[in-house]
Amino acid sequence: MLDGELTFRGSSLLTLRVARGLEKRDIDTALVCTGMSGVEPSLLKGVRLHEIPGYTVPIWGLLVLRTIYRDLKEQRPDVIHVQDSRLLPQGARLATRLGRPLIVSVGDQTDAAAITLRSPIPQLKMLLSVSESVQQHIPRSALLDAVEKRVVYPGVEVPEASTIDLPLDDDRPPVIGMAGPLEVIKGASFFLRACHRVIEAGHDIRIVIAGSGPEEHSLRQLAASLDLSRRLTFVDGGVSMGGYLSAIDVFCLPSLQQGIGVMMLEAMALGRPVIASGVGGVTSVIQDRVTGLIVPPSDSRRLADSIIELLQNRILARQIAAAGQNLVRSEFNEHRMLDELIALYREVQYATPRSAESIPIHSRTSSSRERT
């Protein structure tokens, strides 16, 4: 598996979940990344992680890729899975030199729209999107049309219901939170303005934003101008994600664009009611007023109204939370995701011609495990 910088964002957490899950299924999995920043250490347990800076850098990256190739050619992986579609060129070079099939994951609409092929890549067997919305943004061209495309929904771990505390406990002020990279497209400024409206309406709330990014300074300034600073806590990605999500009462996803929302799925799995912008793949998960509340993007007034509705109607909030958790348990769970991925790996592995020297790893007497 190839990825870039691992950070506190849904796509990175998904990559780590896949790598860890494949290892649990007895599939040898090596995850190569360029670095890590703000990733909770517990998320790295059970992951065979190789941090190799530089392979995404032009010219220098070619030298680094040659080093990676030398390390891999003696024990060649059966499948190369690129987790960030922007690394398609690097993945293609390795797959071509190693003679192995290549799968590329596409995480959001922007990355999908930027995919281009200037020449055929025979090793590229599949483009995997996290939602139909993302897949629809892959450009049409003769070369890309020849590549198979599928959707594999992300999956998260769902704890037992008995271990989850109900949201909106009467013994403390409600906590309203969001999580992810602090970038303009994630809509955190609209989230803060919505929280300001909620407070003006007379509700005593606490606000938490988990993550870091280029917008953090601007968001702190906005919070100060709205007189939110004493109620607002910024936490970096090194915190326990499960602990953070369990501590909030209402999870907001105010994105202006969204592939699907892995953080949203994590919150739903922990029985938290979700309010999300009706953009991209979000609508393939959330049924409005059943498994969550849908609001228009960049509309702080509607977001505030939805937060207030859940604060005033805790029965509704808990019904939505339970329905959302049941949905994730049945359709967006980790086991289903891993089953689909392993089936795809085997499909492309056996569809790719192999020379005598490249016998599938799992059929060698030296190892009974498959390698990805």
Image: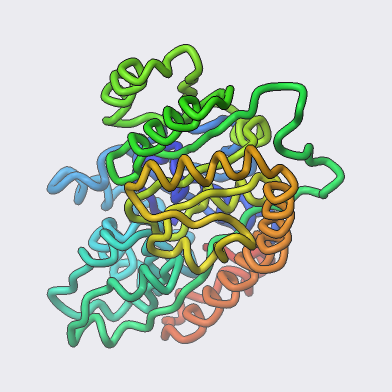
Q: Is residue 275 left or right of residue 246?
A: left
Regarding residue 26, the answer to whether it shows in the image is no
Front residue (pair 333, 173): 173
Closest to the observer: 279 or 289? 289
Q: Residue 224 in the image: x percent, y percent?
A: 34, 15
- The residue depicted at 56 percent of the width and 23 percent of the height is 206
Picture coordinates of residue 189, whole percent (x, y): 33, 34
How many numbered marks does the figure carry?
0
Above or below — where is 132 with respect to 68?
A: below
Identify the image quadrant of residue 72.
bottom left
Q: Which residue is farthest top?
A: 230
Q: In the image, what residue occupies the spot 42% across and 15% down?
A: 229
Q: Name the outermost residue toward the right.
A: 162
Residue 280 falls in which quadrant of the image? bottom left
Query: Considering the image in quadrants, where does the N terminus appear?
Result: bottom left
Q: Foreground residue, 360 or 239?
A: 239
Side (left or right) of 123 relative to 42 = left
Q: Residue at x 29, y 19 (%)?
A: 221
| Quadrant of the rendered image containing residue 286 | bottom right
Residue 284, above or below 141: above
Q: Residue furthest front?
A: 201
- Is residue 54 visible in this depiction of the protein? yes
Q: Residue 275: percent from the left, percent from the top?
A: 53, 49
Residue drawn at x 64%, y 43% as measured from the top left: 46
When the figure is inspected, residue 39 is found, relative to residue 350, above or below; the finding is above
Q: How is the image coloured?
A: rainbow
In the rendered structure, the answer to whether residue 27 lies left or right of residue 138 reads: right
Q: Position of residue 50 (x, y in %)?
A: 45, 42
Q: Nearer the viewer, residue 65 or 173?
A: 173
